[in-house]
Image: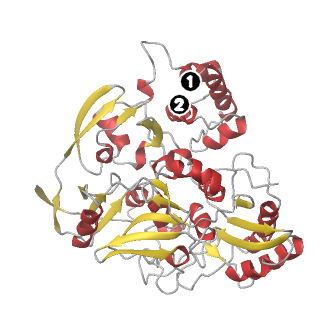
Amino acid sequence: MINFEYARPADVADAVRQMAADPGAKFIAGGTNLLDLMKEDVERPTKLIDISRLPLKEVRETPSGGLSIGALVPNSDLAWHPLVEKRYPILSSAIQAGASQQLRNMASTGGNLLQRTRCYYFYDTATACNKREPGSGCSAIDGLNRMHAILGASDACIAVHPSDMCVALAVLDATVHVAGPKGERTIAFADFHRLPGDEPERDTNLAPDEIVTAVELPAQGFAANYTYLKIRDRLSYAFALVSVAAALELDGGIVKEARLGLGGVAHKPWRDTGAEAALRGRPPGEAAFAQAADMVLGGARGYVHNGFKIDLARRAIVRALTQAASGTPQSQSSKKIA
Amino acid sequence: MARIRDGRNGAAMAVPAKVPVTLTVNGIATRIEVAPWTTLLDALRDHLDLTGTKKGCDHGQCGACTVLVNGRRIVSCLTLAVMQEGATVTTVEGLERNGALHPLQQAFIDHDAFQCGYCTPGQICSAVGLIAEGRARTGEEIRELMSGNVCRCGAYTNIVAAIQQAMERS
């Protein structure tokens, strides 16, 4: 691994101050993605600012009936937190669909948001990659692109965001709390991650000198009608080809509220509010679900190796909405798809 | 701080001094001096001669380097030793008690839950963590929560049986 300096800040303000003073520095929390990228020479920080001991490990109820999740809460603790399992089971399920238990024990909430794509070319410093080396080109567009984006991609980058947790946070309308030299601010989850456009090196709208301090969930958790359905090349411990987070609020046989998010298909967790709106006011069923799926995938574009993901996503959306409507969420241990 | 020339960009850079790290490893208070970029895995193997913990992929994908830190299973290749200052670490060498094998070690022997054995220390440490978590009951749940430990000999059936035996007796 490369050589670097190591520092342990006293508090969030100190962490922000140290980051502002050193443009080559990086925050490290769980380290599961950053250290891996450093071993591959993709990330080359001159200094690691170890924030893992900062007091951001609390999960607490908010006055508005929601939940505030400290940025350093490990993924495994969050997935198994009693309030999350009870009120936001879609988040619990999505977290358990990702990585391995060892990694979930290490990885932090904030770090999950900030993990980088697993595009093979981003990881391979011998190849061109606009995300790693702006202006060098995209090797994936005409290369091996089985895992890559079908929605929202650009000519500069067709990488996907790898997180499962973030797909659930997107449909739950989470808010990201951040701190920086100018103070604190909040970012709506939909605005946190970016599409690649012509700046694929920017994954998020977090400024380089800002730090994620918490993720806040609103009160509505969709605990009765939800699912997280993840389709991948092996049954566990693999990134999604397509994943779907579906959450419904049903009222007298009619969809009152609908949330639909996809993972593995775009540079960010893919919410389609148009498709959600089209589901509202209708009886849950095949006709409404198929129409929603068609709306989500209307603008989809496949490449040489990933064209199959468009049909896969369409079927996964219908299946996920069916699971959500019938109150039979996908189990993350039994792999049978209900 | 010594100054050396960095091979990649030719610029002189300051090399941070080695840092002291205090750990309790297998019940023994331990103080080592490591460079900041030393992973916990390399510290265990190269500084403490605890070579039971294996380096497989070194990228968090295989689970061979699984150890218990403060009672939780993690992959020791993806954390820095310096980040674990003050932690309690248990490796496969620390599982036996007064010469008696840990129930999981005995169960792996009873069920022939390995062929080459390279993944076994990680499998066993991971299973200790799994049982402590108390979430897995069925074979399916064990398989899902052990999916971070790869066995290229394919001894999975016997690994699950060994873990089930240890769970029943714990």
Residue at image x 58%, y 47%? A82
Measure the C-alpha gap from mark 1 to mark 2. Answer: 7 Å
Secondary structure at numbered mark 1 = helix
Query: Which of these two is toward me, A278 or A42?
Result: A278
Color style of the picture: secondary structure
Lower position in the chain sequence, tag 1 or tag 2: 1
Q: How crowded is mark 1: few (under 14 residues within 10 Å), some or many (20 or more)?
A: many
Res. B20 mark:
none
Q: What residue type is labelled 1?
A: Leu
Asked if one can make out residue A115 in the rendered structure from this viewpoint, the answer is no
Asked if one can make out residue B93 in the rendered structure from this viewpoint, the answer is yes
The subunit carrying tag 1 is: B
Q: Position of residue B100 (x, y in %)?
A: 48, 13
Q: Which residue corresponds to mark 2?
A: B128
The subunit carrying tag 2 is: B
Q: Which residue corresponds to mark 1?
A: B104
Q: Is residue B55 left or right of residue B88?
A: right
Secondary structure at numbered mark 2 = helix
Residue B4 lies, with reference to residue A19, above or below; the image says above
Residue B135 lies, with reference to residue A162, above or below; the image says above
Residue at image x 82%, y 73%? A289
Residue A64 lies, with reference to residue B161, above or below; the image says below
Q: Which amino acid does label 2 sit on?
A: Val
CB-based contact (under 8 Å), mark 1 and mark 2? yes
Q: Where is residue A320 in the image (x, y as percent from the top left)?
A: 77, 64
Q: Position of residue A8 (x, y in %)?
A: 25, 55
Residue at image x 47%, y 38%? B72
